[in-house]
Image (cartoon, rainbow, N blue to C red):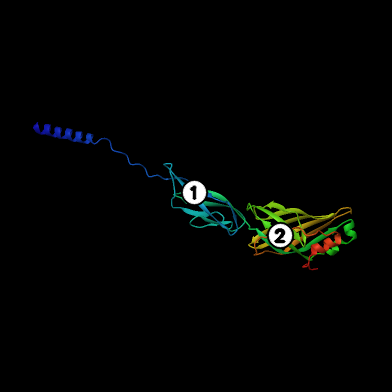
Amino acid sequence: MATRTLALMALLLSAGCNDSKGPSTPTAPTPTVSSVLVTIANAILLNGSSEQAIATVTMSNGTTQQVAGTWSSDNSGVVSVDSNGRVTGQGSGRANINFSASGITGSREVRGVPNYQGQWSGSYRITGCSHSGAFAVIDFCGEFPNNRVLPMNMTLTQGSRDVVEARTFLGSLQSDAMNGPIENDGAVQLSGIIRSNGTTIDVFWRFNSLQAGRMVGGLRQTWRQSGISGQAEIAGEFRDMNKSSTALAPLASPPVMPQTLEQLLRAIGGPGSVK
């Protein structure tokens, strides 16, 4: 009987000691990655230029922090990205830059566009000519037969990266200022007018830069003369068009415009024309 009493007292004392410690504190769970936000200062990249992308990770406890992860591009032909998130334009089009951490991925769409900024010079080759009315009487297309090569120059700026502003030159004839957006494949279409007294030349250009410093494309011209009937149309393709290595110069004042159609024909041919 005494032995049972002593055992019961020992059990009660043990329980009392445990109660004095109070309830145990649960261990907080380790926070996990909930979402990833990818940002970049400029999402339009000129071919060959780079921008830094940043990945911000939100954890399950609501905090944000930097964590180890993997960068990738879903179209490396348009933009590439290195292991530090440095994004470089490689071609024309759109691509997603991705950052993955702990199985969670964030993305940011970016765009690659050609670098048109600068002075371009070269020539174009006549691929077609038609004339009517007084233009046919003077045999306008006799001055512009197929395969004749004529000089051409452009001054292009790209302030907003995805829009090209231009002044174009056919020989010594200068167009009005014009602008056009860069299409998804990198091509640009521009239309403008060259004016010389009673003559207007509506010009249309479509070109692309598939290789840095080189341009391919074509043009159309529609000639009209105040006071005479008919018109003339010329089509041509770029023969060689290269970017100058010199800095972009201010646009020169337009030269004195030719007074007669004959003078216009000489002006558009320029000193470097080849028949």
Residue 102, image x, y percentages: 44, 49
In the image, 24 versus 191, the foreground residue is 191
Question: Toward which corner of the image does residue 150 lie, by quadrant?
Answer: bottom right
The quarter of the rendered structure image containing the C terminus is bottom right
Q: CA distance from mark 2 to mark 1?
A: 44 Å
* Element under disc 2: strand
- Find residue 256 and report its horizontal and vertical position in percent: 80, 59
Q: Which mark is residue 154?
A: 2
Q: Quadrant of residue 170?
A: bottom right
Q: Quadrant of the N terminus?
A: top left
Q: Position of residue 184 (x, y in %)?
A: 64, 52
Q: Residues within 10 Å of mark 1 (few under 14, many from 20)?
A: many
Residue type beneath disc 2:
Met
Nearest to viewer (mark 2 / mark 1): 2
Characterize the local packing of mark 2: few (<14), some (14-19) or many (20 or more) Cα atoms within 10 angstroms.
many
Q: Closer to the camera, 160 or 211?
A: 160
Residue 38 against residue 253 in the figure, above or below: above
Image coordinates of residue 193 in percent, x first then y, are: 78, 54
In percent of the image, x 12 and y 31: which residue is there? 5
Q: Earlier in the sequence, mark 2 or mark 1?
A: 1
State the residue in front, 143 or 183: 143
Which residue type does callout 1 highlight? Thr
Task: Tell me the tag on residue 105.
Answer: 1
Q: Going by the image, does 61 lie left or right of 159? A: left
Q: Do labels 2 and 1 touch, CB within 8 Å?
A: no
